[in-house]
Amino acid sequence: MKIYEPKRALYRKNKPTTGCCQFCDKKTINEQQCLSLESKHWMVVVNKYPYMDGNVMIIPKRHVRNVADLLKDEWFEFQDILEKTMKKLSQIFKTEDFNIGANIGIDAGGSIEHLHWQIIPRRKKISNSVNIFADIEVITILPEDLRKIIDKNKL
Ligand SMILES: [Zn+2]
């Protein structure tokens, strides 16, 4: 099955005039960032093109391409930001189950060459006609709404 999603391709191709990539561009990030989860070295942003409901990304503020480029302070803080992000998403989506992953490099499927982890809370599939007949996951929460929900939710 192929899904036509031209806006996603545009997001990848249209590199900002300021900054070196989409995640270094303040204008782009300001539209996606969950300020309640920001830390010194990391930001949590909603995925504008989510794989599933609740899909956020944990991104280092510094432009790095690979985990080997992270500094000890950044690694140390990563554990904390990951735990906080999962805790908040657990509260919102009523689950303890997650997919967490990073595609490092274009050949590995990374669409933006700025290190980032995809964090996806998992729930039992909601049965509706699209899921049943086409085995397609339907996104029910707009990224801008998810951002508001995350920032309003207190830990
Ligand atoms: Zn960058």
Image (tube, rainbow, N blue to C red):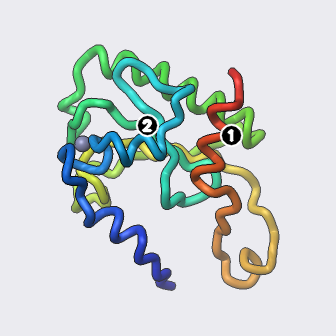
- Name the element at disc 1: helix
Q: Which callout, 1 or 2, points to the residue nearer the camera?
A: 1
Q: Amino acid at mark 2?
A: Ile
| Quarter of the figure with the C terminus | top right
Q: Examine the rendered structure and indicate whether residue 17 appears above or below residue 68.
A: below
- Name the element at disc 2: strand
Q: Amino acid at mark 1?
A: Ile
Which residue is painted at 20% across and 46% down in the image? 18
Which residue is painted at 35% across and 63% down in the image? 11
Neighbor class of circle 1 (other Cα within 10 Å; few <14, some 14-19, many 20+) is some
Q: Quadrant for ligand 1?
A: top left
Q: Nearer the viewer, residue 48 or 2?
A: 48
Number of the label disc, if any, that sits on residue 149: 1
Image marks 1 and 2: residues in contact by CB distance under 8 Å: no
Q: Nearer the viewer, residue 97 or 28?
A: 28
Q: Position of residue 85 (x, y in %)?
A: 56, 31
Q: Position of residue 9 (x, y in %)?
A: 35, 71
Q: Examine the rendered structure and indicate whether residue 28 appears above or below residue 1.
A: above
**Where does label 2 land, which residue?**
58
Which residue is painted at 59% across and 42% down in the image? 147
* 88 left or right, relative to 16: right
